[in-house]
C-alpha cells in the first residue's frame, strides 16, 4: 500500500511498525458550532483510509480528538477562544457548548456511516497530561515565559522549518506587527496561556501558580503520548494544519520526549463552492441537513467526494451531487437486480484489482472507473466488497425484504383480476421510489430515487 507522505513529499510504501496494532491519529473538530460539509469531508476521506487499511489485513488503533478548549479564533495565539465565543453566542456555558457540539459532530459522523475511532479523546480530559508535557518542555529548556503564557522557543528545535518547508527568514520579515513584542521568534507559540485578572475565560486550570489553559496544539501531542505512544504510524489532518498546527505538534513532542511524532503524515485538501473555501466566515456553508433536505442521501455526498482525490481541492456543486446520486442509484440497481435473478459467480481478480487502486494513495476515482467497467458482471459478493471499502449503502437488502412480499400480494390480486388493488400497490411502491416492470419472465423492481 502506497501513501503520499507530507513529511517527505514522497509516495511511500506503508510499513507499520506492528501490522496488528497500526496507530492512527486524526485531528478532530473544534466543538463550538455545527460542522459544514467541508469539515466532514476530511473524516470521509480518512474513513476510506481506515477501510483500506482494514482490507489490507491491518488491525487499527485510532484516536480522534475533540478540541473543547484553547483553539483561538486566529489559529495562532491571539483572538478569542472559539468555545468562549460559542458560549456567548448561544447564552450557554462553555461546557454546555462543548457537550452540545460533540453530540452534533458524533451524530453527523454516525449518519455518514463512518467507522468509529477506537477512542474519542476530549482535550479537557487530558489537562494533567498536557501540564506534564509543558513541564517537560520547561525542564528541557524549550520554553520561555511572557506575561501572556509559556511559549515554545522554536529556535531551539533545529528542524522546526523542515516539515512545512517554512521560510523562517521571510516569516520574520513579514511579521512586524503580527506577533507580540514579547515573542522571541514569530513562529514561537503558546503551549500554555495565562488568564489575566478580570479576563473572561471560563475554562481554567491552576498551573505554574496562576489560572490558565492549554495552547491549541498541546492536546494532540499529549493525547498521542498518552493513548498511542510516539512515533505513531499515520497522522491525518487538513492541508491547513501543515504550517502551524502539525509543525507545532512535532516541535512539542520533540522538545518534551525527544521523539518523532509520526512516521507518515497525510493531508486532505479543501472543499470549495464557486472556487472559495467553504467557511463560516465567508457565509457559504452547506450542512449535512441541507444535503438531506434537498432529497439526497449522505452517501451521495460521500460518493461525490470519492469521485475526486483527497489531495485535490474539490469544488462542490448541486449538479455534480445530482450526477453522483445517479451513479450511486445505478450501482444500487445493479445490486437490486442480483436479488431478483440467478446468482452470479465472483468476477475473476476484481477484488484484488479494486484494492490495488486504493492501495495507490487512495485512488478512489480510478477504483470507481473499474467498478463502472465491471458492473454488468459483478456478483453480489463483489458488490459487498465494494460496499465494505466505501461504505456507500449499496446493498438494498432491506428494500428487497419489504418489496418482494408486496409484489406477491400484487400478483395474487392480478390473478383474481383485482386490477384496482394491483394498481394501488404499484402506486404505493412508486411513492417509496420503487418502480415495477412486468415482463414475460415476471415482475421486476427498480429503485428510482
Ligand atoms: P475550522 O473549524 O474552520 O477550524 O475547521 C476545522 C478543520 O476542518 C480545518 O482544520 C480543516 O482541516 C477542515 N476544514 C475547514 N474548512 C474546510 C473546507 N472548506 N474543506 C475541507 N476541510 C475544511
Ligand atoms: Zn492536532
Image (spheres, grey):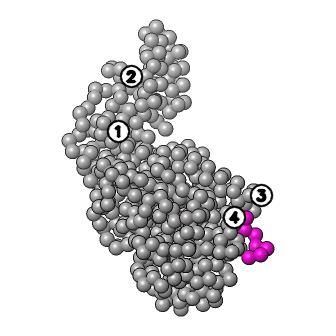
- When asked about the image quadrant of residue 262, the answer is bottom left
Query: Which residue of the protein is positioned furthest toward the top in this rendering?
Result: 416
Residue at horizontal 42%, vertical 69%?
261
Residues 386 and 17: in front is: 17
Asked whether the residues under the numbered discs 2 and 3 touch, taking CB atoms below 8 Å apart as contact, a structural biologist would say: no
Closest to the camera, between mark 3 and mark 1, is 3
Q: Which residue is mark 4?
A: 203
Percent x, y for residue 63?
A: 47, 56
The crowding category of the residue bearing disc 1, from other C-alpha atoms within 10 Å (few below 14, some 14 to 19, many at least 20), is: some
Q: Give, as a single range, the part of the protein colored magenta.
A: 196-202
Q: Is residue 416 visible?
A: yes
Asked whether the residues under the numbered discs 3 and 1 touch, taking CB atoms below 8 Å apart as contact, a structural biologist would say: no
Closest to the camera, between mark 2 and mark 3, is 3
Mark 2 sits near ligand 1, with its Cβ under 8 Å away: no
Give SS at disc 1: helix
The crowding category of the residue bearing disc 2, from other C-alpha atoms within 10 Å (few below 14, some 14 to 19, many at least 20), is: some
- Separation of disc 2 and disc 3 at Cα? 58 Å
Q: Earlier in the sequence, mark 4 or mark 3?
A: 3
Q: Which residue is mark 3?
A: 91
Asked whether the residues under the numbered discs 4 and 3 touch, taking CB atoms below 8 Å apart as contact, a structural biologist would say: no
Q: Earlier in the sequence, mark 4 or mark 2?
A: 4
Q: Earlier in the sequence, mark 2 or mark 3?
A: 3
Residue 158 magenta: no
- Separation of disc 4 and disc 3 at Cα? 16 Å
Amino acid at each position: 500500500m502506497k501513501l503520499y507522505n507530507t513529511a517527505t513529499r514522497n509516495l511511500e510504501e506503508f510499513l507499520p511498525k506492528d501490522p496488528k496494532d497500526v496507530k492512527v491519529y486524526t485531528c478532530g473538530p473544534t466543538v463550538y458550532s455545527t460542522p459544514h460539509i467541508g469539515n466532514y469531508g476530511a473524516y470521509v476521506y480518512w474513513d476510506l483510509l481506515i477501510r483500506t487499511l482494514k482490507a489490507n489485513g491491518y488491525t487499527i488503533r485510532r484516536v480522534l480528538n475533540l478540541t473543547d478548549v484553547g483553539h483561538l479564533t486566529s489559529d495562532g495565539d491571539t483572538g478569542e477562544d472559539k468555545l468562549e465565543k460559542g458560549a456567548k453566542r448561544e447564552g450557554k456555558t462553555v461546557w454546555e457548548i462543548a457537550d452540545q457540539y460533540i453530540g452534533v459532530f458524533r451524530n453527523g459522523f454516525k449518519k455518514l456511516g463512518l467507522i468509529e475511532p477506537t477512542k474519542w479523546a476530549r482535550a479537557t480530559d487530558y489537562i494533567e497530561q498536557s501540564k506534564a508535557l509543558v513541564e517537560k518542555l520547561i525542564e528541557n529548556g524549550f520554553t520561555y515565559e511572557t506575561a501572556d503564557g509559556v511559549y515554545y522557543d522554536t529556535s531551539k528545535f533545529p528542524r522546526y522549518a523542515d516539515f512545512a518547508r517554512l521560510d523562517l527568514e521571510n516569516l520574520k520579515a513579514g511579521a512586524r506587527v503580527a506577533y507580540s513584542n514579547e515573542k522571541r521568534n514569530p513562529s514561537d507559540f503558546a503551549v500554555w496561556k495565562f488568564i489575566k485578572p478580570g479576563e473572561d475565560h471560563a475554562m481554567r486550570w491552576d498551573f505554574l501558580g496562576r489560572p490558565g489553559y492549554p495552547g491549541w496544539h498541546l492536546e494532540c501531542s499529549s493525547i498521542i503520548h498518552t493513548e498511542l505512544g510516539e512515533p505513531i504510524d499515520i497522522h491525518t489532518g487538513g492541508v491547513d494544519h501543515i504550517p502551524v498546527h502539525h509543525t507545532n505538534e512535532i516541535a512539542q513532542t520533540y522538545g518534551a520526549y525527544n521523539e518523532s511524532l509520526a512516521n507518515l503524515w497525510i493531508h486532505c485538501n479543501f472543499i470549495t463552492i464557486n472556487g472559495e473555501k467553504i467557511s463560516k466566515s465567508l457565509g457559504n456553508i452547506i450542512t449535512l441537513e441541507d444535503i438531506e433536505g434537498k432529497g439526497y442521501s449522505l452517501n451521495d455526498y460521500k460518493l461525490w467526494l470519492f469521485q475526486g482525490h483527497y489531495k485535490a481541492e474539490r469544488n462542490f456543486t448541486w449538479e455534480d451531487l445530482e450526477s453522483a446520486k445517479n451513479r450511486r442509484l445505478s450501482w444500487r440497481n445493479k445490486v437490486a437486480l442480483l436479488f431478483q435473478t440467478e446468482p452470479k459467480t465472483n468476477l475473476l481478480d476484481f477484488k484484488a484489482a479494486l484494492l490495488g487502486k486504493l492501495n495507490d494513495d487512495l485512488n478512489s476515482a480510478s477504483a470507481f472507473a473499474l467498478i463502472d467497467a465491471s458492473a454488468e458482471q459483478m456478483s453480489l459478493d463483489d458488490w459487498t466488497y465494494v460496499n465494505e471499502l466505501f461504505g456507500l449503502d449499496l446493498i438494498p437488502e432491506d428494500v428487497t425484504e419489504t418489496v418482494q412480499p408486496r409484489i406477491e400480494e400484487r400478483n395474487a390480486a392480478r390473478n383474481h383480476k383485482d386490477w384496482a388493488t394491483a394498481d394501488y400497490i404499484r402506486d404505493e411502491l412508486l411513492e417509496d421510489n420503487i418502480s415495477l416492470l412486468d415482463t414475460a419472465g415476471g415482475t421486476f423492481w427498480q429503485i428510482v430515487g
